[in-house]
Image (cartoon, helix red, strand yellow):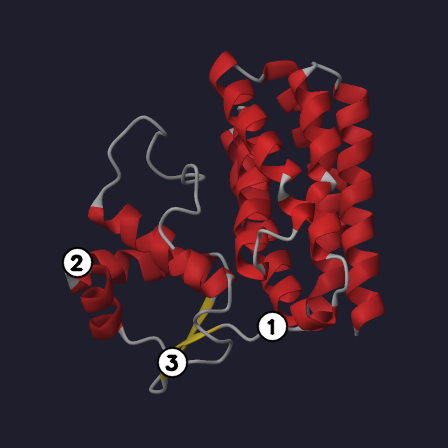
Amino acid sequence: MEQVATEPAGGAPRDAEPTLAERAYRAIRDRLVMLEIRPGAPINEEQLAQSLGVGRTPVREALKRLQYERLITTYPRRGTFATEVNITDLAHISEVRQELEPLAAAQAARRATVADRATLTALRRELESAHSGRHAAAELMHLDLQVHRAVYAAAHNPYLEDTLVRHDNLATRIWCLFIDRLSDMAGHVEQHGPLIEAIVAGEPEKAAQLARGHVEGFERAIRGAI
């Protein structure tokens, strides 16, 4: 799953070759986010290192970051485990995202570079096929992550980007938990189309409004599925 991230928030610069620790971090992070490593499952450093083709030191460094991001939990004398998904966290996560997602979208509309707009435009084309049924659920989830991360990156505020990536990851874990109960997943992902258009067109107020509506709609959909 290493291909999911367009860049590491708070990690290496986008144009730099990622270190082994960065590669391990991205891969393990996205396995945790997509629940490929199930909530509550034990984390085995040696097995992860073997599956990623790296040594245990990069994995250990990656796990330190992931613990800070609340994706893994370490218990004394018990070991390290994937964090459980607690639906009661939804309100707290949404509270942060409802304030910061519109800010990031507006700043992206103001600050996006030519390269940012090209990335977003390419993702917009990918979204056009989301409703055609050609995408499996996992592919739609990956596309959703890519769009969010591209928007955060285009805001060109590393502190805002880092915060939102972490909260979007936690929200996505909740989404994955209820994926079988959500009827219009493609429609939810496709909502990013107008948001991308507003950012590329340089319309910060419209982008902010669409971003807030998207987060509010996500919370409603999850609560409706519980």
Q: Residue at x 51, y 13 (%)?
A: 114
Return the mark for residue 48: none
> According to the image, label 3 marks what residue?
42
Which structural element holds mark 2?
Answer: loop
Tell me the crowding category of disc 2: few under 14, some 14 to 19, or many 20 or more residues within 10 angstroms, Cα based: some
The nearer-to-camera label among 2 and 3 is 2
Sequence-wise, the earlier of marks 3 and 1 is: 3
The quarter holding residue 81 reads bottom left
Measure how far apart labels 3 and 1 are at the Cα level: 14 Å
Which structural element holds mark 3?
Answer: loop
- 48 over 143 or under it: above or below: below
The quarter holding residue 42 reads bottom left
Q: Residue at x 65, y 31 (%)?
A: 104
> According to the image, label 1 marks what residue?
85
The amino acid type found where label 1 is placed reads: Val
The image position of residue 36, as x and y in percent, is 45, 69
Quarter occupied by the N terminus? bottom left
217 to the left or right of 74: right
